[in-house]
Image (cartoon, helix red, strand yellow):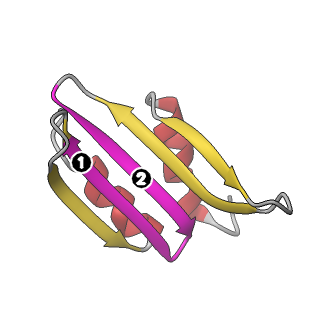
């Protein structure tokens, strides 16, 4: 964690109930990390390509996008976790 302190937010997300899936290439390299958190009225999603490139989205259950953020992992997760509970 000393080398990449921004990864602590991902550990915190696991601890708070987020589900994670590792996307692996045909050569068994990590390509992307996907995460989701399911709420009664919406779904929050996160795609992490690297610590500088992440996307977070909140969707209503009917599929329309309620909120989106793109940028560094730290900034995107900060915005995502600042949203009210769904």
Across and down, in percent, residue 75 comes to: 36, 68
Across and down, in percent, residue 64 comes to: 15, 48
Kindly state the secondary structure of the residue where label 2 is placed. Answer: strand
- Image quadrant occupied by the N terminus: bottom right
Relative to 19, 86 lies left or right: left
Relative to 29, 74 lies left or right: left
Relative to 18, 57 lies left or right: left
Say whether residue 38 is magenta: no
Which of these two is toward me, 76 or 46?
Answer: 46
Tell me the crowding category of disc 2: few under 14, some 14 to 19, or many 20 or more residues within 10 angstroms, Cα based. many
Say whether residue 47 is magenta: yes
Tell me the crowding category of disc 1: few under 14, some 14 to 19, or many 20 or more residues within 10 angstroms, Cα based. many
Q: Which residues are magenta?
A: 41-59
Which of these two is toward me, 20 or 62?
Answer: 62
Picture quarter containing residue 69? bottom left
Residue at screen point 35% across, 64% down: 76
As drawn, which residue projects farthest toward the right? 27
**Residue 16 to residue 68: above or below:** above
- Between discs 2 and 1, the one toward the N terminus: 2
Kindly state the secondary structure of the residue where label 1 is placed. Answer: strand
Which of these two is toward me, 29 or 14?
Answer: 29
The span from disc 2 to disc 1 (Cα, nearest Å) is 9 Å
Residue at screen point 48% across, 44% down: 35
Residue at screen point 25% across, 27% down: 39
Number of callouts in the render? Answer: 2
Task: Report the residue marked by disc 1.
Answer: 58
Helix, strand or loop: magenta stretch: strand
Which of these two is toward me, 78 or 41?
Answer: 41
Task: Report the residue marked by disc 2.
Answer: 46
């Amino acid at each position: 964690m000393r080398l990449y302190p921004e990864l602590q937010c991902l550990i915190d997300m696991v601890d708070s109930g987020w589900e994670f899936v590792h996307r692996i290439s045909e050569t068994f390299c990590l390509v992307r990390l996907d995460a989701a958190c399911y709420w009664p009225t919406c779904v929050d999603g996160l795609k992490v390509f690297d610590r500088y490139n992440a996307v977070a989205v909140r969707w209503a259950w009917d599929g329309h996008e309620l909120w989106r953020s793109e940028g560094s992992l730290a900034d995107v997760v900060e915005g995502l976790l600042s949203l009210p509970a769904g």
